[in-house]
Image: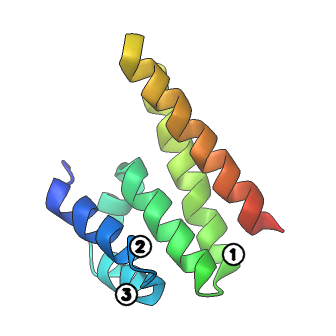
Amino acid sequence: MHTSSLVVDKARELTAAGQHAEVVKYLAARQGSELAEAASLALLYGTAQARVGHHDEGLRWLDTALEQARTLERFLTGSRLHAGEHFVRECLHRRHVFAW
């Protein structure tokens, strides 16, 4: 399933505004497969879950984002590979932060 950029943009907007509970609510209304298949949504959802105190759920979704990013990274080249590597580092960083 292709994730609409409007969904990602809305989740990013809520995140930037610090409305993490709204991010959880907004993305929880999406189909579970959409979150599991879109690394960017899984990263946003996991981060929001952890920030509202649901650390185990947050880590689960951050792990999902990391798994998706690593899978996609294998198929990237050039500047897209660099972006993929950056995304993997971001997933690892957030996972480390919320694991403590």
Q: Nearer the viewer, mark 1 or mark 2?
A: 2
Q: Which residue is found at the position 68% from the left and 50% from the top? A: 93
Neighbor class of circle 3 (other Cα within 10 Å; few <14, some 14-19, many 20+) is: some
The answer to whether residue 8 is above or below residue 16 is: above
Dot placed on the residue nearer the N-terminal end, 2 or 3: 2
Q: Is residue 57 visible?
A: yes
Separation of marks 1 and 2 at Cα, in angstroms: 19 Å
Task: Give the residue type at disc 2.
Answer: Thr
User: Contact (CB < 8 A) between labels 1 and 2?
Assistant: no
Q: Residue furthest front?
A: 17
Q: Position of residue 4 (x, y in %)?
A: 16, 56
Q: Residue furthest right?
A: 100
Query: Can you identify the residue that label 1 sits on?
Result: 56
Neighbor class of circle 1 (other Cα within 10 Å; few <14, some 14-19, many 20+) is: some
Task: Give the residue type at disc 3.
Answer: Glu
Separation of marks 3 and 1 at Cα, in angstroms: 18 Å
Neighbor class of circle 2 (other Cα within 10 Å; few <14, some 14-19, many 20+) is: some
Dot placed on the residue nearer the N-terminal end, 3 or 1: 3
Query: Can you identify the residue that label 3 sits on?
Result: 22
How many numbered marks does the figure carry?
3
Q: Position of residue 6 (x, y in %)?
A: 15, 62
Query: Can you identify the residue that label 2 sits on?
Result: 15
Q: Nearer the viewer, mark 2 or mark 3?
A: 2
Q: Is residue 76 visible?
A: no
User: Contact (CB < 8 A) between labels 2 and 3?
Assistant: no
Task: Give the residue type at disc 1.
Answer: Asp
The answer to whether residue 17 is above or below residue 93 is: below
Dot placed on the residue nearer the N-terminal end, 1 or 2: 2
Picture quarter with the C terminus: bottom right
